[in-house]
């Protein structure tokens, strides 16, 4: 807690003693509950890299989803730098981490490593202050709507319908499925999805960049027949011109969204001029410190913001973003986070509501359960 009289951390003689004492990173690989695929990729496991930072009796948790090599980037490159730095000043530490990886390449593994450490530092700071992470950041929202996300192209129509019905029964007013692997099958899958969710629930699709712009425009017309209102990554996010063209070409009422693969603010700024909804992934885009500033991009352009995946972190973050409209409640991440973390936020009438009485993210690593999935050193 912070003393109102001195502004220092209770239990420390001065704020200078709120120093990071230890940084640890561990990779865990959890098999999926069944084979999964989207428009451009197939997978059968999810790898999470968990970072823990300690100061005194408090321990902050951060994480990212990516290759186990991220743990080595944290341990070998970032941990020696972060140890001894001010646990109450994540932005200052973030800036030093950015400088440290200059010659290694700031994107990709380094960006995800910085993301995990940055999230852990913000969690630690909130715990030192005795506040939930959402409250320590300052809330615009008490809760944030979540949309059910999965609907993998590897699912049968029956499996697809079962998953979507479950989300609707849990209060989600929006659901999203994968499209684009076999475009000729998409109408049948969308028909099954619409029948499962009814007419009032918003139906969203994600092509993961499977199309070129003209094929995406044709697909958008077909998807519109099923009331699809949100088309994510119809083309690669690198195709800014294609995204901008599609934004103006798709049926009225259909939004174009992208941003999950952005590594920094400059990429988000470029994307913001090409989409209807700007996305970012806090576990990829250099963490909370960076994505907090993405809210300014959205505010300046009058764009809504949608958080990509990692619901336990994204829920707290989005409560602090004025332009946030929803969090992606992605099947794989929701499942892994519930397995590996005690205290994971549940869906409450289709929304995620950070508890103000639980400091930080409000989660703790289930160490015995997690050890079963540990990989690497």
Image (cartoon, rainbow, N blue to C red):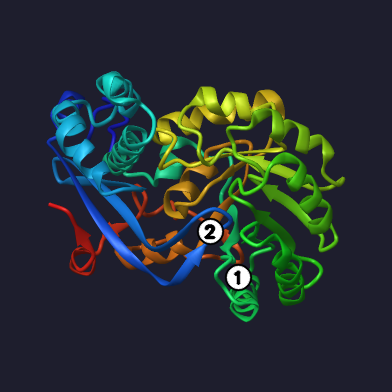
| Count of numbered circles in the view | 2
Quarter placement of the N terminus: top left
- Residue of label 1: 167
Measured in 3D between alpha carbons, the distance from the residue under mark 2 to the one under mark 1, in whole angstroms, is 9 Å
Whether residue 19 is visible: no
Q: Which one is nearer the viewer's eye here, 323 or 222?
A: 222
Whether residue 248 is visible: yes
Q: Where residue 319 appears, x then y in whole percent?
A: 54, 44
Q: In which quarter of the image is residue 47?
A: bottom left
Q: Which of marks 2 and 1 is nearer the N terminus?
A: 1
Task: Verify CB contact (< 8 Å) between mark 2 and mark 1.
Answer: yes
Which label was assigned to residue 336?
A: none
Where is 270 relative to 148, above or below?
Answer: above
Residue 114 vs residue 155: left or right? left
Residue 198 vs residue 324: left or right? right
Q: Where residue 218 appears, x then y in whole percent?
A: 81, 50
Where is 160 relative to 148, above or below?
Answer: below
Residue 240 vs residue 26: left or right? right
Q: Which one is nearer the viewer's eye here, 275 or 324?
A: 275
Residue at the spot 29% in from the left edge and 34% down from the top edge: 2
Q: Where residue 227 appears, x then y in whole percent?
A: 82, 60
Q: Is mark 1 on a helix, strand or loop?
A: helix
Residue at the spot 76% in from the left edge and 66% down from the top edge: 187
Q: Where residue 207 appears, x then y in whole percent?
A: 63, 52
Residue at the spot 57% in from the left edge and 61% down from the top edge: 149
- Local packing at callout 1 (Cα closer than 10 Å; few below 14, some 14-19, many 20+) is many
- Local packing at callout 2 (Cα closer than 10 Å; few below 14, some 14-19, many 20+) is many
Q: Which one is nearer the viewer's eye here, 210 or 326?
A: 210
Q: Which one is nearer the viewer's eye here, 193 or 288?
A: 193
Q: What element carries label 2?
A: strand
Q: Quadrant of residue 30?
A: bottom left
- Residue of label 2: 329
């Amino acid at each position: 807690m912070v003393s109102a009289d001195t502004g220092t951390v209770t239990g420390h003689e001065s704020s200078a003693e709120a120093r990071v004492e230890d940084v640890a990173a561990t990779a865990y690989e959890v098999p999926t509950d069944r084979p999964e695929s989207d428009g451009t990729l197939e997978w059968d496991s999810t790898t999470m890299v968990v970072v823990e930072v300690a100061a005194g009796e408090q321990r902050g948790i951060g994480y990212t989803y990516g290759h186990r090599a991220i743990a080595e980037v944290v341990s070998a490159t970032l941990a020696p730098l972060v140890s001894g730095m001010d646990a109450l000043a994540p932005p200052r530490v973030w800036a030093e981490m950015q400088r440290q990886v200059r010659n290694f390449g700031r994107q990709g593994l380094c960006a995800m490593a910085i993301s995990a450490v940055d999230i852990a530092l913000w969690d630690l700071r909130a715990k030192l202050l005795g506040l939930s992470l959402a409250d320590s950041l300052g809330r615009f929202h008490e809760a944030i709507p979540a949309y059910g996300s999965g609907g993998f192209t590897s699912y049968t129509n029956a499996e697809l319908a079962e998953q979507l019905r479950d989300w609707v029964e849990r209060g989600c007013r929006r659901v999203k499925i994968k499209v684009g692997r076999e475009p000729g099958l998409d109408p049948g899958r969308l028909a099954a999805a619409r029948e499962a969710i009814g007419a009032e629930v918003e139906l969203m699709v994600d092509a993961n960049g499977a199309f070129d712009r003209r094929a995406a425009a044709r697909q958008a017309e077909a998807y519109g027949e099923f009331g699809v209102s949100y088309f994510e990554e119809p083309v690669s996010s690198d195709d800014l011109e294609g995204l901008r063209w599609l934004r103006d070409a798709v049926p009225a009422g259909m939004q174009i969204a992208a941003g999950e693969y952005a590594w920094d603010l400059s990429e988000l700024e470029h994307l913001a001029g090409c989409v209807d909804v700007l996305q970012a992934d806090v576990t990829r885009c250099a963490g909370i410190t960076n994505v907090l500033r993405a809210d300014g991009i959205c505010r300046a352009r009058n764009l809504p913001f949608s958080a990509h995946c990692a619901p336990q972190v994204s829920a707290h973050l989005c409560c602090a973003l004025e332009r946030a409209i929803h969090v992606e409640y992605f099947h794989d991440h929701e499942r892994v986070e519930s397995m590996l973390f005690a205290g994971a936020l549940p869906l409450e009438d289709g929304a995620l509501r950070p508890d103000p009485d639980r400091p930080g993210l409000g989660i703790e690593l289930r160490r015995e359960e997690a050890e079963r999935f540990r990989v690497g050193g």
